[in-house]
Amino acid sequence: MNKKTFSNLLSKEKSKFEASVAKFRKLNETVQEVSNEAFDMYDLGNSDHIPNVSRVSSSTSGGQAEIIQKLDAIETRQKVILKFLRSVDGRLTGIEKSIKDNIPDKAEVQAQSKLLRECHVIVSKTQRSLSRITGDLEDEEYTELSAELPMTSEVDVRFIEEKLLKKESTEAMMRIMLNAKGFKGNVDGVLRMLFSDELMSHYNLEGRINKKPLLKLKSVGLIFDIFADMDKNAICEDLRRYVVLSHNRLKQKRYKLKAGLE
C-alpha cells in the first residue's frame, strides 16, 4: 500500500470514528434525559439526593411503575451504548492493525535508508568511472590539457609531453582522446584534435627527410591504447595517411592564401 492510499484509508477511518463519537454523544444525552425524567418524579429534598422510600405513599404506585419503565429504558439505552463502544473499540483495533501492517517499523526504515544511501554511493562511483572514460568529467588536468589542443607549435608539444609524465595528466589526455574518437571514431579524427596542419608540416612518421618523428611523441603513443582493438600496423598506416593528408591540406591553404593576395 502506497502512502497516498494509506492516507486516504486513515482519513476514511477518522471520519467514521468522528461520526461514531457524535452518535455516542447523542445516545448519552438521551440516557441523561431519561434519567432526569425518572428522578424528577421524586422530591429528592436535601438528603444527599438519595430518595427516601418511606416517603413514597401507596398513592404513588402508579408513579413507581412509570419509574420502572423509565429505568428499563435507561438499561436498554445503556446496552445500546455498550454495543456501540465495543464497535468503536473494534474499529480502533482495526486501524491500529492497519497502521502496523502498512507502515514499516523504525528498524526497517533505517535499513531501507542505509540501502538507499549505499545505492547512491554505487551510482555515484559508477558515474564517475564512466565519466573518466568518456571525458565528461572535466577536472583541472582535463581543462588544462584541452586548452592547449590542437598543438600549434613546438612549445605546445613540449608542454604536453612534460604533462604526460604524470599519471593524472595521462588519464586526462586519454579521456580527451576518447571524446575525440567518439563511438565510431577513427585515427584521423583524433590526430586532427591533437595537431594543427601547420605543426604537422614539421613531422612525419619516422622522422625522415629532416622531419621530426611522430611516433616518438607520448601523445601519439596513447593512440595505440585508444585503438587497442586495431592492429598496430594498421594504426601506423593511418598515421602515415594522416601526415600525407595534413601536408596536402597545408599546401592547399598556402596556395589559396597566395592566390588571394595576388
Image (cartoon, rainbow, N blue to C red):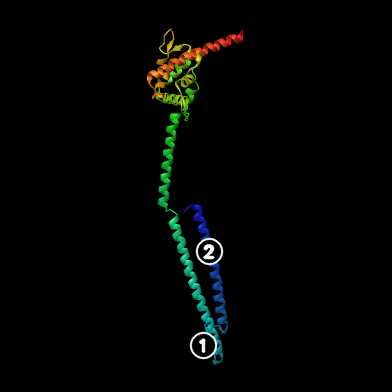
> Residue lying farthest bottom?
58
Q: Which residue is mark 2?
A: 16
Q: Nearer the viewer, residue 70 or 53?
A: 70
In three-dimensional space, the C-alpha distance between marks 1 and 2, rounded to whole angstroms, equals 46 Å
Element carrying mark 1: helix
| Quarter holding residue 241 | top left
Q: Which residue is mark 1?
A: 53
- Give amino acid for label 2: Lys
Residue 187 position, x and y percent, is: 44, 21
Say whether residue 153 is visible: no
Element carrying mark 2: helix
Whether residue 39 sits left or right of residue 104 in the image: it is: right
Mark earlier in primary sequence (1, 2)? 2
Q: Is residue 251 above or below residue 66?
A: above
**Residue drawn at point x = 51 percent, y = 78 percent:** 76
- Give amino acid for label 1: Val
Residue 239 position, x and y percent, is: 43, 17
Q: Residues within 10 Å of mark 2 (few under 14, many from 20)?
A: some
